[in-house]
Amino acid sequence: MSVVIAALGLAACEAAPPQGGGGVTPPAANAGVGSVSFKLTIGGGSSSYTFDEVTYDLSGNGFHRDAMVDVANSASFATVISGVPFGTGYVLTLSAQDVAHKLTPCQGSATFDVTTATTVPVAVNLTCHQTAVPPPPPPPAVPVPRAAVCALGALLLVLGATRARRSSQA
């Protein structure tokens, strides 16, 4: 079951800075340097799963950046990774774990290039599976008082003796 899907857009430094709010860093002003932006949306019928954070790791061409992004208060987020040098063979890896641990850790990655000033859409599918449901615990033991056990034993002894007497008389 594919649970989380992230849409990834790549933009070089000549692109206009993204519009919007917090957590967005504008692209670097250096020539030959771009930025990576990605947007995460929870999909695939996973409305019953919540995530507090998503971890990303971007590497390639001697460049590396990783971070944890707080997603506790929304079903989607967007961020920009700035200062990414032009190059090919970059790898973005995303991972997330649902709060209740009902899923295996969600993981996915995509390879992409930053070679021009155009936006390059890349999809990263995070795949996770429902964890096995453990069997229910056994019912709790009911304590039986010692006197009740003795009384039951005595009753069975009397009933057994009565039956044996009737059998021998017949």
Image: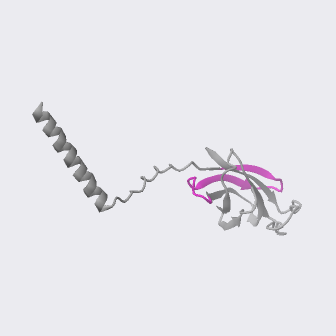
> From the viewer's perspective, is residue 169 above or below residue 47?
above
Residue at 63% from the left image edge and 58% from the top image edge: 96
Instruction: Specify the farthest residue to the front.
Output: 169
Give the quadrant of the N terminus.
top right
The percent coordinates of residue 40 (x first, y second) are: 73, 55
Q: Position of residue 148 (x, y in %)?
A: 31, 57
* Residue in front for this viewpoint, 45 or 155: 155
Q: Nearer the viewer, residue 129 or 109?
A: 129
Q: Residue at x 75, y 62 (%)?
A: 73
Residue closest to the eye, 131 or 150: 150
Q: Is residue 148 left or right of residue 127?
A: left
Horizontal placement of 81 versus 93: left or right? right
Q: Is residue 120 magenta?
A: yes
Looking at the rendering, which quadrant does residue 106 occupy?
Answer: bottom right
Pick whichever, 44 or 32, lies toward us. 44
Number of numbered discs overlaid on the protein picture: 0
Residue 166 vs 63, above or below: the answer is: above
Magenta extent:
98-125
Residue 22 x/y as whole percent = 82, 68
Whether the magenta-drawn stretch holds residue 140 is answered as no
Which residue does the image show at 28% across and 56% down from the upper left? 149
